[in-house]
Structure formats: structure tokens, C-alpha cells
Image: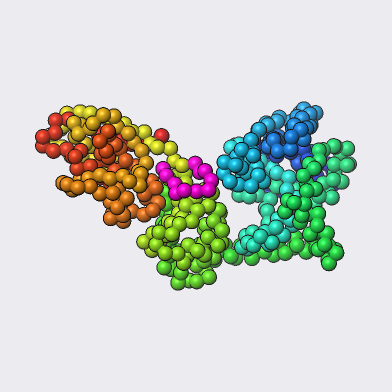
Amino acid sequence: MSPFAENIALTFAPHLKAAQTQGLFCALSGGADSVALLLVLQELRVPVTALHCNFHLRGEESHRDEAFVRRLCQERNVPLEVEHFDTLAEARRTGESVEMAARRLRYTWFAQHDRPTAVAHHADDNIETLLLNLIRGTGIRGLTGMRFDNGVNILRPLLAVNRSDILHYLAQQKQSFVDDFTNADTTFRRNFVRHRLLPLLQELNPSVRKGLLQTQQHLQAAEAVYTLGLQQLTSLFSPRTEGGTTRYPLLPLREQGEVGRLWLYEQLAPLGFSAEAVDALLTAREGATAYSRTHLAAVSRGSLEVAAFSTLYAAPQLPFSVDLAPLPVLQQNRVPRPTPFHPSRAPHIATIDAHAVVGELTLRRILPADRFTPYGMRSGSKLVSDYLTDRHRSRIDKLRALVVCDEVGILWLVGETIAHRAAVTPATGEILTLTLTPA
């Protein structure tokens, strides 16, 4: 076994036995780092399937990389899966940078596999990440760096070795790899840190890399204490999650000042909210909203409500597209009116007078101008939005609101009430039971 593999076996020991038994997927771009990862996993007798992403961002070089990966896997008898992405189109669709879109596409694909994926991040990557986050502005977790195990499905076996170790190993193995010309382009922040900032820091302190890695280790220990404190504060702030919405009471958060702000930031940062957005929400008035690419937050009746767009049927106007929840399926059952008649109290079921229906039924999201005459209101009409406000429904509740309409108008405000004209009366001959089921 090579000294390089012995080093990896030692630092990756907590995960190695499971990897040797269950196998791993290996992210393989064709670059030096990922090729070294593939070789050392094979040397450590880990069953490997390679995963290659073709993002179609570098013209012929993208095809060259894929061809190299295919040859390498064939030579080493490694099973290979290749996924093609239209990364530029995806970035345009979401409004993300091309880098962020590629990263999201990559890790989303990895997460679809049934075993962990090993990626080739190494110690120099960790140093660069520390500096990038420090420059950008971050909390303590942004300074602690990457871990060998991300706790979900990503493993980083090379995290204790640096780039020079990797290149030396490949030279010993007489193994070629491909170069990505964009790695030298310092218009990318990471490349700027790698090629310009770090060399300057090394002029100040030749051991700066070692010092930064030691600082990360100290911060990881501090983070453990920090995390324990956050967990103990949860009982004080008492968040509640119900129906896809998490509600954070604002009064105790505001009373605790900086402690409350830090605690809330740690809850919302993983959802994509910035520190500035959290600060603004803590001091915002009723009705204020903020959004990340995946979640909406709204101040409502003394609480901050947060929900994923994927749990909503509608969204406010946004500068990017989001994936909303699919509309449920509307089922209809028409039968003679039973005696006695007892309507269902389930929010996803409504029973109406079948003869009140004019034409076909349609299930849809509510619209700003929607009006109806709610049950019990014998004349006039009311805006659906006003009705929901009177019922103390929040901004997020309204984005989940659905109505069932016929050709005349609204018959059922789902989960709330039916229209007065659709009510079952002693004169009703047939009833129509409407039931919503998940799509």
C-alpha cells in the first residue's frame, strides 16, 4: 500500500470499514483531485461506482473530460454513471450564478443515490473556503470548514491531505488527469484566493496554511459549545411546526437581543436566508416578508412564519421561478340526501347541494379579486382575502388557499366554508361530496 493510501486509511478510519463493506459512489470530474480519490479508494479496497457530471459549460473541453473519465473507468473496471446538465438554462431559470446552479445540480443528483458519494475536497480547499467565508461575512459555522462526513450523504476522504500530496501520489502512480483551464481564471473568487491571496499571506507567514487549519480545528471545538447553547435556547423560544409552517414567536426573540438574533439566524441560514434578512425580519412590521430561493418568511400576528415554496400553491412575485406544490385531485360523489344528514367536518371534504352546481367544477388557487357569499351570509358578497383575514389566516395561509368553482363562481373555500348558495337544506334532493386527495 502506498504511503498516501496509508495516510488516507488513518485519517478516514471512522468511515473506512463501512465504505469497504457497502461501497461508495465517487464524484469523478477527471481532474487531479478526483482521479487521485478514485485510485486511492481502489487501493483501499472500497467498491466504487464513479459519477461524472457534464455541465456543458466549456465546449469541447466538457466532452474531452467525459471521454477521459470513460476511458479511465474502463481501464480500471469501474462502473460509471454520467449525467448531462443544461447548466446555463438552469441558471437563467432560477437566477442563480452558473457556479451555484452547477453545484446544486451536482449535489441534488448525488443525493438521489442510495449510498454516500465521496468527493475530492482536500485541505487546501478547506483553507480557501475559510478565507472566502471570512471575506464574504459569516457566522461561526461558516468558519469551521468542511468535515469528513457532512452528516447526510457526502464523504471527503482527502480532507487531511493537500494538493501537493495529491500531485505527488499521481506522479508515483504514473496516472494522467485532465486540466480545467478555468481553474487559472482569477475572476472566480476561489481562484483569486488560491492564486493571489494565499501566496501573499504566505509571504507574511510561510506557515499560514498550517495556522489556518489549526484555527479551523479550534473553531470546530468552539462550535460544539455554541451548538449546545443553541439547543438549550430552543425551549425558551418555543418554535412550533404545523401543516408545513414553522412559527417563531417574535417577542422572546426580540427581548433576548443579540442572543435571539443569533439563534434565529442559525435556524434560517440553512434555508438560504442571509443575516441581513434575519435582522430585517426581527424588526419588521406586520405583513413584512422575505424570501430565499426555497422558502418564504412572513411576519404575522406576533410570529415569524416560515414555509417552503414547495408546500404552497401560490407565491408572491419573485425575480426567479420556484417549484410550488401540485394541486390536489378533486373527487366528486353524487348521492341522494340521507336522513338525517351530517356533513363531514374534515377540512379536505365538503358536502353541497348537487343542484346548486352550474356546469363543470374547477379547483384552483385563489385570485386577488375573488369574491363569494360565505355560508350564513344571506346577501351581498365578500372578498376571499378579507374573509381569510377575518378568520386570522396569515399571509402564508392565503398562499395555500384553494377554491372549487362552477361556472357561476366559488362554491367551496377549501378548509374554511362553502358558499351560501351551495348549502344543503331540507329541500335538497341530492348531495355532492367533494374530496381533495394528494396529487
In the rendered view, does 250 fall on the left or right side of 90?
Answer: left
Q: In this view, does 81 lie above or below 397?
A: above
Instruction: Answer whether residue 331 is visible to the viewer in this image.
Output: yes
Q: Is residue 88 above or below residue 241?
A: above
Q: Which segment is the magenta one?
A: 313-323
Q: Which of 348 and 144 is in front in this view?
A: 348
Outermost residue toward the left?
Answer: 426
In the image, residue 194 lies at what x, y percent? 78, 54
Does the stretch in magenta take in 99?
A: no
Image-quadrant location for residue 73: top right
In the image, residue 374 lies at what x, y percent? 22, 46
Instruction: Answer whether residue 232 is visible to the viewer in this image.
Output: no
In the rendered view, does 8 fall on the left or right side of 344?
Answer: right
Q: Which of 227 and 336 is in front in this view?
A: 336
Q: Residue at x 39, y 47 (%)?
A: 399
Q: Residue at x 64, y 35 (%)?
A: 85
Q: Could you tell me which quadrant the N terminus lies in? A: top right
Q: Residue at x 22, y 45 (%)?
A: 373
Image-quadrant location for residue 240: bottom left
Rendered image coloring scheme: rainbow
Task: Report the predominant secondary structure element of the magenta stretch.
Answer: loop
Q: Could you tell me which quadrant the C terminus lies in? A: top left
Q: Is residue 335 above or below residue 166?
A: above
In the image, residue 113 lies at what x, y percent? 61, 36
Does the stretch in magenta take in 320?
A: yes
Tell me how many marks there are: 0
